[in-house]
């Protein structure tokens, strides 16, 4: 326990350093718009902290059918910033740039003010968790389609996983390779075969034969940790918790692309997902390792076929039912990340197209307050990360290029340096929280320039594919069959 406290104490200097960099933003750009961005971010942070307190005290009430204050702020702030810029008599072009920068700064300030302390707080809570004295019956479902390179290691990891009462169900979804034969060679594993129908249908088919009170889904390319199953059921001690997502890490850290993805997984989980966990509104229980109460899945109509991201869709349905969805940092699973740009594109196109399909499918979650923190925080945050930030990033860098041509080298360089410092500190905090490889921090600058813009471009492409109603299909990266973490 002393070692845990020492680790927690190491987080405080990192958190304070993040706020120091945020203060430097204000000093570097001492305009009224910057101060207005800071004030807006502080107001939104206080709003969510008050909501969190009211929920813990049982004082949250159902409101009228209007968007959350957060959603209203996202829509109104650019117009407010534009009005302020016009009052300060900037040229039209400069005003447009300032509007984007001010809105982006507001989101940067807000996400840091809210997510950083909540992530540290969440780590403190997890350090106090005790082992569960009760282990409910558990069914692990592994959907598999042409997974001959990886299915054996997934099964072996599950067989070795420490849990007193579990059943392992592998659903072969009409594979044309040796997946079925390999899975059938293991004793103690229930292997089901069906015609190919997609991942959602394989999961639903497996649920017909599952006997466990808790259903865990594991992708065929995932390797679960020995204690992952015990850790993931801890949260189900609270009867209001309906689903728990695991901590997914990259297995094959073999080149620049996979190491960037490894850092991406760590930062998204250990900063922003921890903050959502405090509110009980984690929006995605990933297929790589996630757990649901079987009764909740059945009540929600199981997995649907109308999106490419069945895990996001079923999680949103669970949140809309009024249930709590949380995360476990200690329930670890390793998964293969795409090693080539082509495979990354194929993976992210499915993810992002499916995410937009799910957002449009459940768009009523933006306006219906009966959905709690899904409406107040979860969906608006997804809208920021997928709908605003990619376009804002492109606009800011286009404006920066114009500014450089006009000779504003010092201003652009100092701003870039500050954003790089902020991203590096956020990455260090996430790495320290998760006890991850500190060498990953070397890839933090690529989340300001490089990897970030690659992901932004994929996101924008996926959005237009859905808006233009282009035909989309399931795409995935080629399996490598990596056997150990690099």
Image (cartoon, rainbow, N blue to C red):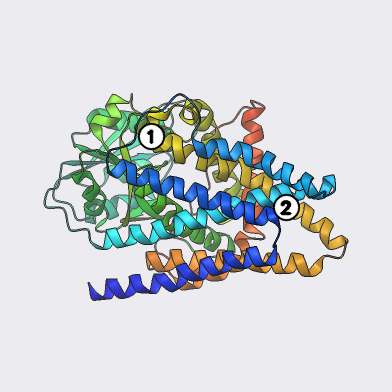
The picture quadrant where one finds residue 125 is bottom left
On screen, residue 100 above or below 255: above
Residue that badge 1 annotates: 372
**Left or right placement of residue 266 versus residue 152 in this view:** right
Disc 2 residue crowd, few under 14, some 14–19, many 20+, Cα 10 Å:
some
Mark 2: secondary structure = helix
Q: In screen coordinates, is 146 left or right of 233?
A: right
Gap between marks 2 and 1, in whole Å? 33 Å
Q: Quadrant of the C terminus?
A: bottom left
Residue 412 is situated, as x and y percent measured from the top left of the image, at 75, 64
SS category of the residue bearing label 1: loop
Residue at 49% x, 57% y is 113
Whether residue 173 appears in this view of the structure is: no
**Residue 467's spot in the image, x, y percent?**
64, 28
86 sits left or right of 307 in the view: right
Picture disc at residue 396: 2
Nearest the camera: 439 or 172?
A: 439
């Amino acid at each position: 326990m002393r070692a845990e406290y020492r680790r927690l104490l190491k987080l405080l200097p990192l958190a304070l350093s993040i706020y120091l960099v945020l203060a430097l933003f204000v000093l570097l750009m001492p305009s009224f718009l910057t101060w207005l961005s800071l004030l807006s971010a502080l107001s939104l942070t206080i709003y969510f902290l008050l909501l969190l307190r009211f929920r813990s005290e049982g004082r949250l009430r159902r409101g009228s059918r209007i968007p959350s204050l957060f959603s209203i702020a996202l829509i109104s702030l650019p117009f407010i910033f534009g009005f302020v810029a016009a009052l300060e008599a900037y040229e039209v072009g400069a005003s447009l740039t300032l509007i984007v920068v001010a809105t982006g700064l507001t989101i940067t300030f807000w996400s840091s003010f809210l997510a950083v302390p909540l992530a540290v707080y969440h780590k403190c809570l997890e350090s106090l968790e005790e082992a569960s004295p009760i282990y409910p019956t558990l069914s692990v479902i592994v959907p598999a389609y042409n997974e001959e390179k990886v299915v054996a290691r997934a099964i072996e990891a599950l067989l070795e996983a420490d849990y007193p009462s579990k059943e392992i169900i592998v659903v072969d979804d009409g594979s044309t390779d040796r997946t079925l034969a390999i899975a059938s060679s293991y004793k103690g594993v229930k292997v089901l075969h069906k015609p190919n129908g997609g991942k959602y249908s394989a999961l639903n088919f497996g649920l017909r034969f599952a006997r466990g009170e808790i259903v865990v889904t594991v992708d065929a390319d995932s390797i679960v940790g020995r204690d992952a199953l015990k850790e993931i059921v801890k949260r189900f001690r609270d009867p209001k918790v309906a689903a728990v997502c695991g901590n997914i890490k990259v297995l094959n850290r073999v080149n620049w692309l996979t190491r960037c993805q490894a850092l991406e997984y760590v930062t998204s989980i250990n900063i922003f997902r921890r903050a959502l966990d405090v509110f009980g509104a984690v929006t995605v229980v990933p297929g790589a390792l996630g757990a649901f109460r079987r009764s909740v899945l059945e009540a929600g109509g199981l997995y649907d076929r109308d999106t490419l991201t069945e895990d996001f869709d079923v999680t949103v349905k669970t949140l809309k039912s009024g249930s709590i969805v949380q995360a476990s940092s200690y329930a670890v699973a390793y998964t293969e990340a795409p090693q080539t740009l082509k495979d990354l594109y194929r993976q992210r196109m499915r993810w992002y197209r499916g995410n937009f399909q799910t957002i449009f499918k459940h768009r009523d979650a933006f306006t219906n307050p009966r959905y709690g923190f899904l409406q107040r925080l979860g969906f608006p945050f997804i809208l920021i990360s997928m709908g605003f930030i990619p376009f804002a990033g492109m606009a800011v860098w286009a404006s920066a290029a114009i500014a450089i041509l006009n000779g504003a080298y010092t201003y652009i360089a100092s701003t870039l340096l500050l954003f790089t410092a902020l991203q590096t500190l956020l990455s260090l905090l996430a790495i320290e929280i998760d006890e991850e490889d500190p060498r990953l921090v070397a890839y933090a600058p690529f989340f300001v320039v490089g990897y970030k813009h690659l992901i932004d471009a994929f996101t924008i492409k996926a959005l237009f594919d859905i808006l233009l109603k282009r035909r989309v299909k399931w795409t995935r990266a080629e399996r490598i069959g990596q056997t150990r973490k690099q």
